Amino acid sequence: MKRLLAVLTVLLFSTSLALHATTTTNANLRSGPSASAKVLTVIPKSTLVNVGTCTAWCAVTYSGKKGYVSKTILALKATPVPALPVMAPSSGTYTNVDGQQIQRPVMADTKPEGASAQCRDGSYSFSTHRRGTCSHHGGVASWY
């Protein structure tokens, strides 16, 4: 048991899991997490894609394009990859008009603590002002 814990600890701190998926049929890469969202391109059947956060729709990167694919047509698999270096705190924040550091919008399955709005692309914003909130994420879907 101690050996297993030691191995798991090493794996936990030395690698992370990258989520990949293979399309089980031709897949529409959409601009948002909805069947009515604009189709950006069609991903051929059996294509390996990088996957971000998933709910009913998965955030997917394919050929440099970012969009969404229905989870039902993806065969998901986790692949161990080397851990990435920790990014500087400023990479996940921006400075608002009041000079405050504000967390950039994030994708999440549930509303993160401190989120002020959910954007139309499914991400959550932490903006302290309404003007410009979710401007690069399709606009505001709902305010909190």
Image: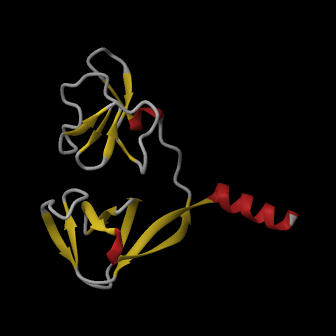
Residue nearest the observer in this picture, 117 or 62: 117
Residue nearest the observer in this picture, 58 or 8: 58
Query: Where is 58 relative to 21, above or below?
Result: above
**Outermost left residue:** 38
Residue 114 appears in which quarter of the rendering? top left
From the viewer's perspective, tell me whether residue 113 is left or right of residue 143: right
Residue 2 appears in which quarter of the rendering? bottom right
From the viewer's perspective, tell me whether residue 52 is left or right of residue 70: right
Give the residue drawn at x 67%, y 62%: 11
The percent position of residue 74, horizontal first and vertical second, equals 36, 75
The percent position of residue 102, horizontal first and vertical second, equals 37, 27
The percent position of residue 122, horizontal first and vertical second, equals 30, 49
Query: Where is 123 relative to 17, above or below?
Result: above
Specify the color scheme.
secondary structure
**Outermost top residue:** 98
Q: How many marks?
A: 0
Query: Where is 14 relative to 122, above or below?
Result: below
From the viewer's perspective, tell me whether residue 78 is left or right of residue 110: right
From the viewer's perspective, tell me whether residue 86 is left or right of residue 93: right
Residue nearest the observer in this picture, 21 or 55: 55
The percent position of residue 143, horizontal first and vertical second, equals 28, 32
Residue 73 appears in which quarter of the rendering? bottom left
